[in-house]
């Protein structure tokens, strides 16, 4: 066999061995068992509320079907397109994808084409002929440098690690998008609730201003006392304080929403419906296995698999490393004869490295890899436990908030009746103005609490959407 054939055969064998001959030292891994109960907690707090949509699993719904207000849908779509955190998450995915491609490329020999030409002059004093000499050398070649034969799967382990890291980053991107949808929904719901609080406060302020005017007129006519006027003015000033508070809250809510959107907010109309009507009420199955669909849990699982693959790379460090360096080309002192048959040149150099004494470094690296794998197991299990707690808390709040809001609305109606009766008794002169003020405060407080509870109910449904790993895709329009 001539040199050219030998070189071709060597390179071909190197490629085949590098791709096919590697074995894997990655430990077999089974996904750890779920460390939580297989079903959600049971009891009065966890009953399904009336009116919950049972047509399909809540986790299968796109956000467009969960968040039904058209303005909220527009804001969510805008945020997904422009939010900088989501943009960073997408770029992290591209970075992880490129890193995986780098590791994948290490499995194959890297061929480099080279061409060179040199012209040198040797002085007469250094020349063997006693006369100055001019020498030329030209070469063209194709070579592979230090290509590692992956007999023990070190490179494949690193490739597997990079792949799992990429998949983990992809799940992190999905989780970031779900979190963004939830944040935008909560910010919009908070803005709407504060708008309602401001409107209620302005109505209360106008009512108390009228009450002060009426009381002042009654005082001039000798019907009311100066204490009645002072109490009416105190009630008015309290409403003014609250009006300033909610005016500030609305402005800050708009700023928070604009940051999430990533673009100027513009006008946000006040919703005509209650905030709770903007979010679907879900039915959740009894099985907790739905948690495994959450992107943060899938992210933790891929991170676990990446850590497990790294053990294979650490184990391979205990075995010999074999690499090849070779080249095939032509070399001549004359440019015109560079490609003639006699100018062929080749080189071949295997390199074997056998670890003999590393002062325990390889073992330490393996111990670190195993510890990292165990940490990833604990992180995965903790992610499931945290997810279970989030869903359980949201389920407990879902039904109890419905009951609490119903009771609160009855309290508002009762407070309104008390105010009407107190005012009538005061007008007839058979009750003090303090009774009217107490009734006014009770009604205003009950109305404020009703708005807060409705916001809590909406926020709870948003939390349930997020906790169940709600869909990122918009889904069908509602």
Image (cartoon, grey):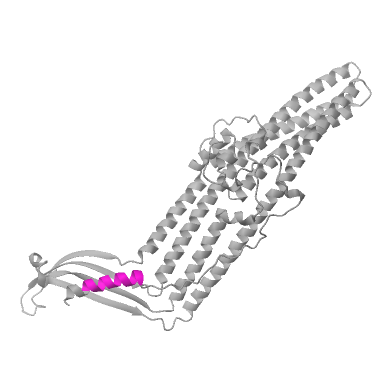
Q: On the rendered structure, is 103 left or right of 237?
A: left
User: How far across and down, in percent of the image, does residue 64 sit?
Assistant: 55, 39
Q: Which one is nearer the viewer's eye here, 201 or 345?
A: 345
- Residue 86 is covered by the magenta coloring: no
Q: Which one is nearer the viewer's eye here, 428 or 285?
A: 285
Is the residue 125 above or below the residue 58 in the image?
below
State the residue lying farthest toward the bottom: 356
Q: Residue at x 30, y 69 (%)?
A: 15
State the residue lying farthest toward the top: 221
Instruction: Kindly indicate the quadrant of the structure image that contains residue 438.
Output: top right
User: How far across and down, in percent of the image, does residue 14 sit?
Assistant: 29, 72
Q: On the rendered structure, is 213 left or right of 177?
A: right
Instruction: Kindly indicate the quadrant of the structure image that contains residue 456.
Output: top right
Residue range of the region highlighted in magenta in the rendering: 7-20
Is the residue 111 above or below the residue 409 in the image?
below
Q: Is residue 467 visible?
A: yes
Assign the C terminus to one quadrant of the image: top right
Q: On the rendered structure, is 106 left or right of 140?
A: right
Is the residue 66 above or below the residue 269 in the image?
below
Magenta segment's dominant SS is: helix
Q: Residue at x 89, y 15 (%)?
A: 221
User: How far across and down, in percent of the image, does residue 154 sit?
Assistant: 41, 71
Q: Residue at x 57, y 57 (%)?
A: 297
Q: Which one is nearer the viewer's eye here, 453 or 467?
A: 467
Q: Residue at x 64, y 55 (%)?
A: 288
């Amino acid at each position: 066999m001539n040199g050219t054939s030998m070189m071709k055969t060597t390179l071909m064998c190197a490629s085949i061995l590098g791709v096919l001959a590697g074995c894997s030292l990655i430990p077999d891994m089974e996904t750890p068992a779920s460390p939580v109960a297989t079903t959600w907690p049971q009891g009065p707090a966890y009953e399904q509320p009336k009116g919950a949509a049972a047509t399909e699993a809540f986790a299968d719904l796109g956000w467009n079907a969960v968040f039904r207000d058209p303005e909220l849908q527009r804001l969510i779509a805008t945020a997904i397109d422009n939010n900088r955190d989501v943009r960073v998450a997408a770029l992290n995915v591209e970075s992880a994808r490129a890193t995986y491609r780098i590791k994948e490329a290490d499995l194959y020999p890297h061929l480099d084409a080279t061409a060179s030409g040199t012209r040198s002059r040797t002085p007469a004093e250094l020349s063997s002929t006693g006369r100055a000499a001019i020498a030329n050398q030209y070469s063209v070649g194709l070579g592979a440098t230090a290509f590692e034969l992956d007999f023990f799967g070190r490179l494949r382990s690193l490739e597997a690690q990079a792949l799992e890291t990429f998949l983990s980053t992809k799940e992190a991107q999905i989780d970031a998008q779900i979190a963004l949808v939830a944040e935008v929904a909560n910010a919009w719901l908070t803005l709407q609730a504060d708008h309602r609080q401001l409107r209620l406060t302005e109505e209360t302020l106008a009512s108390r201003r009228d009450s002060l005017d009426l009381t002042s007129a009654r005082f001039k006519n000798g019907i009311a006392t100066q204490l009645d006027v002072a109490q009416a003015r105190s009630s008015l000033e309290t409403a003014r304080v609250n009006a300033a508070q909610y005016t500030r809250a609305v402005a800050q809510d708009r700023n928070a929403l604009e940051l999430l959107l990533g673009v100027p907010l513009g006008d946000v109309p006040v919703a005509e419906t209650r905030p709770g009507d903007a979010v679907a009420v879900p039915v959740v199955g009894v099985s907790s296995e739905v948690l495994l669909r959450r992107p943060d849990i899938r992210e933790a699982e891929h991170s676990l698999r990446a850590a497990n693959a790294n053990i294979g790379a650490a184990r391979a460090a205990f075995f010999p490393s074999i690499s090849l360096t070779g080249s095939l080309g032509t070399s001549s002192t004359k440019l015109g004869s560079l490609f003639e048959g006699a100018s062929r040149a080749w080189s071949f150099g295997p390199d074997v490295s056998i670890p003999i004494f590393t002062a325990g470094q390889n073992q330490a690296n393996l111990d670190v890899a195993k510890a990292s794998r165990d940490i990833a197991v604990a992180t995965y299990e903790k992610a499931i436990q945290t997810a279970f707690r989030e869903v359980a808390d949201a389920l407990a709040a879902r039904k109890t908030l419905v009951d609490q809001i119903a009771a609160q609305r009855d309290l508002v109606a009762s407070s309104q009746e008390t105010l009407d009766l107190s005012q009538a008794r005061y007008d007839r002169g058979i009750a003090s103005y303090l009774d009217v003020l107490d009734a006014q405060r009770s009604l205003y407080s009950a109305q404020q609490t009703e708005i807060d509870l409705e916001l809590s109910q909406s926020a709870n449904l948003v939390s349930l959407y997020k906790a169940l790993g709600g869909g990122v895709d918009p889904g069908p329009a509602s």
